[in-house]
Amino acid sequence: MNNSFGASHIVQFFLLVALQVLLMDNLVLYSMGFCFIYVAFLLYLPLSINRVWLLFLGFIVGFTVDIFYDTMGIHAAASVLLAFLRPHVLNLLTPHDGYDSSDEVNIHVMGTRWFLTYAFSLILLHHAAVFFLETINFQTALYTLAKTILSTIFTGIVVVIIQLLFFSPKRERIDYR
Amino acid sequence: MRNLFAFIYRFRAFLVFLLLEALCVFLIVRYNTYQGAAFFNSATRYVGQVLEFQSGITDYFRLATVNESLASENAALRQELMQYRLAALTDSTASLDTTYFVATDSSMAYPYHLMAGRVINNSVRRMNNYLTISKGSADGVQPGMGVIAPEGVVGRVKTVSKHYATVTSLLHSQMLVSSKLKKDNTFGTIKWEGGDYRSALLDYIPLHVKPEVGDTVVTSGFNTVFPEGIMVGTISSVEQEPDKSFYTIGVQLSVDFAQLSFVYVVENTYRPEQDSLEQNAGIITDEQ
């Protein structure tokens, strides 16, 4: 069950989007650090998921957040970008002996270094896409860049916290709740 | 032919990626361009219900401040009303013989209707901020109407559903509000530049006027969205840059957008007439 898209991922979808819309919307650090925790849904998907399927999931989750945020298309575009780049980043990060069939995106299974590189690189690309699409112009590029970096750190820390709290060190996952 | 299909199959992920990104760009452009053209937004029924549920909880924590602002607004209105009563007492024209005096039609005097709505979703920290209010087309709200708070200008209705409406906040990179200095009626344009949600810029004030820090900025009433004289803010800084023919004026906005709870939607009953007249004359207003 580890490597297929199951009920736990659907539950994760609703929980993370609800968390994003109801709570994280109001939680902004120094008017610069935003937390787009819904990307964790895409990050936690199985390693061997079909690429096309992943792209559509990215679009769906981004679009859902867009509806609540009234930022039509921005989060969807960034999420599709993340979904497209995810298999490539996974390829770059392949361990020496390749991925096992039982491997999953889990900080205990894959190791801290692997997980941090994976999560932070994808989150950085996603957030850069969101903030630059939002401003369009490059006059305030420095401010946007600072916003991107601070937000990446914020989201990344929350993603790691969720991993440590809800993902078991064993190879099979307890139900996410 | 088979090669073509093989090619498409091989690059299907990339092609789907391009397709979805093109769709997103189309959505972004369309939502930013046309007033009220978007179909999916936070005024949609189910999204509105979720947001209303959320604000139903968070509103409890703000009850004290909301009550205070409503009470102070009541006091200000009551004071104004007393002045009118006093004026009516001393004014004897109503009892004059109608032979000498034509009574004015009081129903035509004030062409604006206000509809109170609760803010159920709000943002202040993005580049383009929107509000969602729980008043929709069933209550008479239409796209393009102005939205004000007791303290001043808030924004403009973008889309409506039956029970909800989204409002383009003044804190939006493409929102322009025609305004004027209260002391000498010089008009300019209010624009928000991002960053701090308590301050905006007042553009197009020519160099021959002398704006000073502390001067009041109000809406001009030149367009059909806002009535004349609605508070916008006070001038916080005046700079004269050497290569510009206009002042760069910073304005401290009178509305605290982070604390908005109740707003009024302004319906201008003369709006269709003025709009169609200006359109026929070929005048395009500077607002979106």
Image: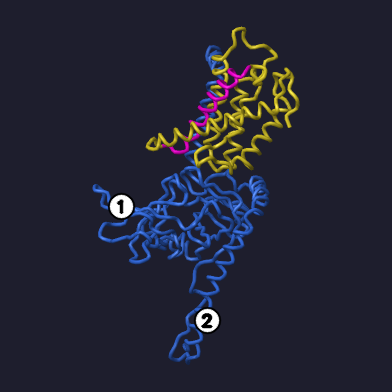
Three-letter code for the amino acid on which mark 2 is drawn? Arg
Q: Would residue B147 be found to the left or right of residue B250 on screen? A: right
In the rendered image, residue B91, in percent from the top left (x then y), is placed at 47, 86
Q: Which mark is residue B85?
A: 2
What's the distance in space between the residues labelled 1 and 2, CA to CA?
Answer: 44 Å
Reply above or below: A71 against A57: below
Overall secondary structure of the magenta section: helix
Question: Which quarter shows the C terminus of chain A?
Answer: top right
The chain containing the residue under callout 1 comes to B
Which chain: yellow? A
Instruction: Classify residue B179 as left or right of residue B6.
Output: left
Identify the chain of the residue marked 2, using the numbered disc in the image: B
The residues colored magenta run A111-136
Q: Which residue is tagged 1?
A: B239
Indicate which disc, 1 or 2, sits on the residue closer to the N terminus. 2
Disc 1 residue type (three-letter): Glu
Between label 1 and label 2, give the one nearer the viewer: 1
Q: Residue at x 61, y 31 (%)?
A: A158
